[in-house]
Image: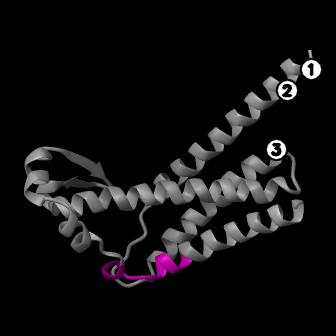
Amino acid sequence: MRRLKKLLDYLLLAAILVGLFLSSSQPYYKQDLRGTISKVVDEQSWNERMEGVSVPYAGKEISVENKGAAGFIEFFIRKGTHFTVFALLAFSFYRVFSHRLSFAVALPWSAFCSLLVAVLDEWHQTFTPDRTGMVNDVLLDLAGSVTMLLIILLNYMYSRRTYHYKMK
């Protein structure tokens, strides 16, 4: 059973890395969600509710006024995906490293490897038509990774505290 868990951890890490590579290899028009969002969302209602709401990102203003409702929603879906995928990547790196390394070593290596993948992923996008690599996306990826690693750290500290308390 332990071998199966190890294998699944390695397969998950490989799947995430392959998925990131394939995603970064696609031009934006192949990933454009605005048409699908427009079919599902009442854009007029969104325009009225979100009027005046804007978010600064990478030196640009993201708002319904300049992106349209579908573009505004897509922005949050894409950035949420960045955050979530890199949180999952950090978790996956941690799981793989923890098979051979102590907690104190596995956690920082997971952070480093997640950051390295984020940088390489954004760099890879610079070679893809209609895509750009952005430092802000690396920082967002890092935020997802660090959030997951903090959750892992807190869980580790809590479980050790609980174990220590039970031993008294």
CA–CA distance in space, label 2 to label 1: 6 Å
Describe the element under mark 2 as helix, strand or loop: helix
Instruction: Sort mark 3 into few (<14), some (14-19) or many (20+) by Cα contacts within 10 Å.
Output: some
Question: What amino acid is at disc 3?
Answer: Phe
Describe the element under mark 1 as helix, strand or loop: helix
Residue at screen point 23% across, 54% down: 62
Residue 107: x %, y % from top left? 74, 47
Residue 59: x %, y % from top left? 28, 54
Residues shaded magenta: 21-30
Q: Is residue 24 left or right of residue 152?
A: left
CA–CA distance in space, label 2 to label 3: 16 Å
Question: What amino acid is at disc 1?
Answer: Met
Q: Earlier in the sequence, mark 1 or mark 3?
A: 3
Residue at screen point 37% across, 85% down: 129
Magenta residue check for 29: yes
Question: What amino acid is at disc 2?
Answer: Tyr
What residue would you read off at disc 1? 167
Residue nearer the viewer, 120 or 9: 9
Q: Residue 87 shows which numbered tag?
A: none
Magenta residue check for 89: no
Residue nearer the viewer, 2 or 152: 2
CA–CA distance in space, label 1 to label 3: 21 Å
Residue nearer the viewer, 164 or 97: 164
Q: Are marks 2 and 1 in contact (CB under 8 Å)?
A: yes
What residue would you read off at disc 2? 163
Q: Residue 103 shows which numbered tag?
A: 3
